[in-house]
Each structure stands twice: as structure tokens, then as C-alpha cells.
Image: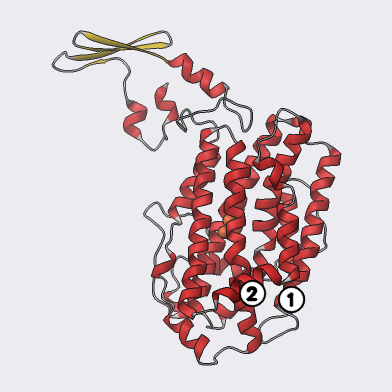
């Protein structure tokens, strides 16, 4: 039934009778097997429902029927649509975040030089890293997907990366940070260069369009999704986020902290979407999921962890008040392992507990009115997010 394609929460749609006649007799509908016939006075329309089923059967993550009109119906990948709705419910806008207290702290010496360095590294790295993710999701992931609801959710992912880029511009503008210096950080700090070169080194050929019926190319595609969503967003973003949110916890740079809190919540959805697309891809293409390829992904994560630890040591060369370097290094291992475990891949470390369990509470707070005395902002829309912790999501 057509009503099966609509959400069960729409009672009218579910109860919509297919055989009816309007009170004035102008409109009628009747079923003839797979065909529904609508009669409007002297006009009739025959709707063949079997075509919808054929379309559903032709939907695949890759190499499926391409919908030129990006029509998500009939929906096959329901979880992607659920994640899309979750992303939409978390919508936020950076430029309404009050940065006046941050600017005051930044300009009056309220931060130590080491704390300032963390903020500068955060701005330097993320100002371009968010763009790498957005560009890669657009040209590497979305371009190669064929199911419309997967493309639809990925487009929302890309739009959120633009919001994150916008948040960095809001920070730079509010604090009056030297733009040339920000750009130079991204280009000149070796640990940042190495992280980005490692993530993007397999991307060029995928952007050109490759034959995804070949197993080796399916594996390249799967590795790119894994690299962007599980390694970069899921592992390499978290330690620096945690450093900035540690400052936030000490009531320092709370405007930036608030933006990073919302960003991190978005990242949780991006990780979940990437993992879902990967699992569906594997489900439909068992040929790619060989023991050798699984090991290749684990090795790729291992390299990403080593590069991330080098970056953590650059951001936090030694312990400072409220921040121990070792905890951030452990946090890298903890996140890498939960991304691997999420795909039933073997883990790499012995870290089994989250050194920053308080972060989950910070990320998923709906209001922070009583915590940080920042401007009260309630970004969740009426279809509010139901998850109470990151674990529910990822
Ligand atoms: Fe992002
Ligand atoms: Fe993201």
C-alpha cells in the first residue's frame, strides 16, 4: 500500500481508504490488482503500484537505480531518514552565540599562554578540517551513492559542515584573530599537515568517478567512508574538542565551548550515518568485506591514531590545570576502539573506560543556563532529540 511508505505516526495516511467515492460523486478510486484507478468526472488515472515495488527493489547503496529527481520514495534505508530527522532537530546557527565574554577573556589575559594555544590550534585545525569533510562527503561519498534517501541524509551532513565552518568564522571575527596566522597554522604545522594528507590521499581517484562494480573500487569507496566518518570525524576531532570543552568547564571561552558542544553533537550523527552507510554497503556487497580488507581498515585506523597522538602532543605539550595529556591520549584510543567495535572490527588498545565521561553530559545538555551562565539558547526544534547520552546515538 502507498500508505506503507508514510510514517506510521500519520494516522490519516494509514487509515486512508483506497476505495472511496466523494459525496458529490465527482471523484472515485478503486483497486484493480496492482493498479489503482482514480476517476475525476470524465478523466481517469491508472497508477501502477508494482512500479513502486520495482523501484524499491532497484534501490542500492551503490550501482542501483539512480533517481534523477532525488525522490526518496519508496524509502528503503529507513535508518538514514531517521538520522536525517535527528540532524534536523539539532539545527543551530553560530552567529547568535554570544561571544562577548570570550572576547573579554581573550583580550584581558584571562587565559594562560598554553590555554590560548589550545584555542588557536582549535581554530587553525577546524577552520579547514570541516571543509575537508564537507568536500569529501560531497564529491566522494554523496556523488557515488545511488539511493536517494542516503544522498538526502548526506546532503544534510554537508550542510552541517558548512555551519561548522561558519562557526569558526564567527570565532575568528569575534576574537579578532589574525586570518593569515590561522591559515598558516593549517599549512605549516607538520602534525596537521600529516593528518590531512593521510585522510585525503586516497580521495582524488574517487572524485573522478570510478567503476564501482569492481571489488577493489568498492573497497576504496568503503575505505573513504571509513576514513572520513570514523577516523577523521569519529577519532581525530574528539581530543581537541575535549580540550576546548575542558576550558568551557572551567568557565573559560564559553561561547566557543557552546559552539563546539553543538558541533560535537552533530558529529555524533555524522559518525552514525557513515557507519550505517558502510554497514548497508557491506550487506549488499559481501565481496568487499574480505579478511585482508578488514585488516586494511584496522591498519588505517592505527595510522590515524598515531598521527592524532602527535597532534595532541602539539596542542597540549604538557599537563596544565584541569588537563592531563595522558587522558587525551587515552581518549584517542578510546574513540578509535569504539569506531572499530561499531563495525565489528578488532580493537587496538586496552583503554576500556572513557576518561571524559562528563563530556557526554555536556554534549547532550539541552540547556546550559545553570552551568555556564552563557546566553540561554534552545536550539532543539519541536521534534526534540530523545537521546540522553552519546552512547544512544553512536
Ligand atoms: Fe563538522
Ligand atoms: Fe561532521
Q: Residue at x 45, y 65 (%)?
A: 366
Q: Secondary structure at mark 1?
A: helix
Q: How is the image coloured?
A: secondary structure
313 left or right of 391?
right
Picture coordinates of residue 106, whole percent (x, y): 52, 86
- Give the image quadrant in which the ligand numbered 2 is located: bottom right
Residue denoted by label 1: 314
- Residue that sits furthest to the left in the current view: 24
Most foreground residue, 289 or 359: 289
Picture coordinates of residue 243, whole percent (x, y): 64, 75
Q: Secondary structure at mark 2?
A: helix
Q: Quadrant of residue 280?
A: top right
How many neighbours does mark 2 have within 10 angstroms: few (below 14), some (14-19), or many (20 or more)? many
Picture coordinates of residue 203, whole percent (x, y): 70, 47
Residue denoted by label 2: 121
Most foreground residue, 105 or 265: 105
Picture coordinates of residue 5, whole percent (x, y): 44, 29
Amino acid at each position: 500500500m502507498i500508505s506503507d511508505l508514510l510514517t506510521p505516526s500519520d494516522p490519516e495516511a494509514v487509515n486512508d481508504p483506497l476505495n472511496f467515492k466523494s459525496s458529490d460523486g465527482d471523484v472515485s478510486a478503486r483497486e484493480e490488482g496492482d493498479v489503482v484507478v482514480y476517476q475525476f468526472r470524465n478523466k481517469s488515472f491508472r497508477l501502477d503500484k508494482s512500479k513502486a515495488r520495482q523501484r524499491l527493489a532497484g534501490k542500492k547503496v551503490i550501482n542501483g537505480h539512480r533517481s534523477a529527481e532525488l525522490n526518496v520514495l519508496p524509502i528503503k534505508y529507513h535508518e538514514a531518514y531517521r538520522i536525517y530527522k535527528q540532524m534536523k532537530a539539532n539545527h543551530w546557527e553560530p552567529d547568535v552565540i554570544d561571544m562577548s565574554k570570550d572576547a573579554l577573556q581573550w583580550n584581558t589575559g584571562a587565559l594562560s599562554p598554553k590555554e590560548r594555544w589550545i584555542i588557536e590550534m582549535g581554530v587553525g585545525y577546524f577552520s579547514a578540517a570541516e571543509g575537508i569533510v564537507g568536500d569529501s562527503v560531497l564529491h566522494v561519498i554523496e556523488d557515488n551513492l545511488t539511493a536517494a534517501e542516503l544522498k538526502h541524509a548526506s546532503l544534510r551532513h554537508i550542510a552541517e559542515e558548512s555551519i561548522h565552518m561558519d562557526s569558526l568564522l564567527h570565532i575568528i571575527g569575534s576574537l579578532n584573530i589574525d586570518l593569515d596566522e590561522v591559515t598558516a597554522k593549517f599549512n605549516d604545522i607538520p602534525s596537521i599537515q600529516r593528518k590531512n594528507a593521510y585522510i585525503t590521499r586516497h580521495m582524488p581517484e574517487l572524485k573522478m568517478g570510478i567503476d564501482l562494480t569492481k571489488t577493489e573500487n568498492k573497497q576504496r569507496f568503503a575505505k573513504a567512508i571509513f576514513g572520513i566518518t570514523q577516523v577523521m570525524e569519529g577519532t581525530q576531532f574528539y581530543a581537541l574538542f575535549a580540550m576546548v570543552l575542558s576550558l568551557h568547564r572551567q568557565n573559560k571561552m564559553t561561547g566557543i565551548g557552546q559552539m563546539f558542544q553543538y558541533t560535537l553533537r552533530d558529529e555524533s550523527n555524522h559518525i552514525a550515518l557513515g557507519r550505517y552507510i558502510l554497514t548497508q554497503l557491506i550487506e549488499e556487497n559481501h565481496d568487499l568485506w574480505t579478511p585482508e580488507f578488514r585488516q586494511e581498515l584496522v591498519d588505517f585506523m592505527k595510522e590515524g591514531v598515531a598521527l592524532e597522538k602527535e597532534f595532541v602532543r602539539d596542542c597540549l605539550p604538557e599537563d596544565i590545570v584541569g588537563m592531563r595529556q595522558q587522558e587525551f591520549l587515552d581518549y584517542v584510543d578510546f574513540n578509535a576502539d569504539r569506531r572499530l567495535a561499531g563495525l565489528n572490527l578488532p580493537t587496538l588498545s586496552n583503554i576500556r573506560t572513557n576518561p571524559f565521561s562528563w563530556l557526554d553530559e555536556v554534549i547532550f545538555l539541552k540547556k546550559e543556563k545553570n552551568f555556564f551562565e552563557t546566553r540561554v539558547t534552545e536550539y532543539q526544534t519541536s521534534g526534540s532529540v530523545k537521546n540522553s547520552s552519546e552512547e544512544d546515538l553512536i
